[in-house]
Image: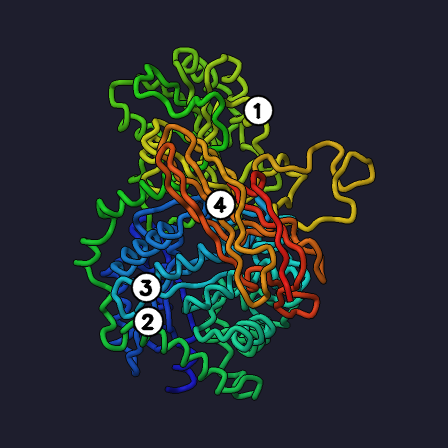
Amino acid sequence: MTLEEKIGQLTLYTSDMDHTGPFIRDHYLEDIRAGRVGAIFNAYTADYTRELQRMAVEETRLGIPLLFGYDVIHGHRTIFPIPLGETASWDMEAIEESARIAAREATAEGLHWTFSPMVDVTRDPRWGRIAESSGEDPFLTAQVARAKVRGYQGDDLRDLHTMLATAKHFAAYGAPQAGRDYHTVDMSELVLRNKFLPPFKAIIEEDIATFMTAFNDLFGVPATGSEYLLTQVLREEWGFEGFVVTDYTSINEMVPHGFARDDKHAGELAINAGVDMDMQGAVYNDYLAELVEEGKVSEATIDQAVRRILLMKYKLGLFEDPYRYSDPQREAELVMTEENLEFARDFSRKSIVLLKNDDNVLPLSDDVRSIALIGPMADNQRDLIGSWSAAGDYTKSVTLRQGIINRQGERTRINYALGTTVLDEDRSGFAAALRAAAQSDVVIMALGEHYWQSGEAASRSMIDLPGLQEELFDEIVKLGKPVIVVLMKGRPLTLENLDEKASAILETWFLGTTTGDAIADVLFGDYNPSGKLPVTYPRNVGQIPIFYNARNTGRPKSEGKFTSKYLDVSNSPLYPFGYGLSYTTFDYSDIRLSTTQMPINGTLEASVTVTNTGDRFGEEVVQLYTRQLVGSITRPLMELRGFEKITLDPGESREVTFELTWKDLAFYNANNQFRAEPGEFHLFIGTSSAEVKQTAFSLME
């Protein structure tokens, strides 16, 4: 290979989109034919990717096939719940299967590589990309990421239904100051290693193929130019063997960061730090050859990057058959099948969280005579599939209105009224909404955000319901009818007013293609909600950041004045991490330990018996937390160490047992050593981080 051909393999360009679908820019076609492109993203469909692949294979000197990448985040054509929503299922088998289905659909349309999972831990709901995250906990985030990598990559990348996965964004992108996307990140290495890096390290054990750099800086160095992150930690410490790609133009962005003089200097910094592939910035194509000639970049460094990328193309079988993924017959057979839609409906139901249910107003009776269905999300197809919805077609999504009609038919009169839009300051629809409510036995209000109000570049300084939705809610509540709020959105919102006045609240996120049918299943009791929150809900924006696994202070809250508390709001959240109600009830026994003195090289078993004390079949997420009382550094009040989702018939009991080793109790100390320290621990098992049984044990030398 010539130096220019090698550099071409390190270059990733985008396809564009218009109303007809993806298309490629003319000058990129020239670059493909000249061997100056190694990968294309945002190109899909079997015919389109096949034609681009033909150019690369048949019209270049070496005939090296292209990689085709895309943001297959929560489904490809069949859209599943947004990642924050799917995490609320706490169902790792379902999450893995959703990724497997997404890979099956995407690979049938010629794709080899997804820019998922996003592994960023985040504690700030002002940050729009919390929608794409798994929330605030590193352990839960790691389990979700592992499941998604297994789903995407399978057991063998030569399998036609598998694709390369990407761990993003490395690292700490989920902690921008003030919750503002792309903003500065400033944290200690202790916080980085104990809270933000563990999920990334965990999925290396799943043999993840690629890592993506973050936009932010860390310790004053942009992540894309961080030799510490990309070489010292990722490769030397963790042993990662795949390739590293930048985020969109993040090499170029080291210039406005003030870390590089110009694009050429930025390219030098990136390649020497450990970046293998340049996404869209064209810096490598423009300057790497010059940098090699000037002795600022070793050709051996470029060779290593090329080798990593070619190895992935080889693992995918592209050198044997470059067109094996671009198969119109597979595309017709595998995309949006009835089986995929059936799974999507079930997965969506699992992701719904019941936040409130006064007087068991839910589930609704099959015989309810009339329902007022009010609000901007009630008959709204466009927003249901959420942000980063890949090749999803929103016109195929089932609205809540249609889902209720599908479920009830003519048994129930649906009095529908828009009431207000998401953002408009127009009250002209209030009167019709109030009439609909007055004429109905029960009111369902579907409220939330537009899909574009969460996701990338969608930070909000205030996280209340936008527009006049809350004002409309207040007017409807005054009628005295039972009011059920169905929330559709991409982040936690401040819901204290709704929580005080609504009869019931369902958190449904953006559920995807089968939204309406899934919500109707829960509203009418065909499915008993089992979701649990993967993130803490604040009472107001002033509490942010608020998260369950905080450390204590020297002046914890008490009745005295000079303690750590607010004057105007409780320290407690509105809804805690791990919280979610059910249509049945569960009782937890006291915790049983195999020993109260755990040897540091031994194990400890913690068991609890959970009983369904209600009259409905139900699913429960049993959660295990620990706390080390004294450490060489201050330790969190609670840390999730395990969970299990179980099913119970009415009256049925089941014993759930967790096993802990020293690794489950270890942390990075002040010397950046991963150690478990002997001492006293509290152990908690319960239905949420705020409702647990408690016992104690000691970790012995």
Q: Quadrant where the N terminus lies?
A: bottom left
Q: What residue type is labelled 1?
A: Glu
How many numbered tags mark residues here?
4
Image coords of residue 21 (percent x, y)? 30, 53
Instruction: Check disc 3 and report the residue beneath it.
Output: 154
**In contact (CB < 8 Å): disc 2 and disc 4:** no
Instruction: Check disc 2 and report the residue beneath it.
Output: 66
Mark 2 / mark 4, whichever is N-terminal? 2
Spatial CA distance of label 2 from label 4 is 53 Å
**Element class at badge 4:** strand
Q: Quadrant where the C terminus lies?
A: bottom right
Instruction: Check disc 4 and report the residue beneath it.
Output: 608
Mark 2: few/some/many CA within 10 Å (<14, 14-19, 20+): many
Mark 4 / mark 1, whichever is N-terminal? 1
Q: In the orientation shown, which residue stands out farthest toward the left? A: 329
Q: What residue type is labelled 3?
A: Gly
Q: Say whether residue 1 is left or right of residue 561.
A: left
**Element class at badge 1:** helix
Mark 3 / mark 1, whichever is N-terminal? 3
Spatial CA distance of label 3 from label 1 is 46 Å
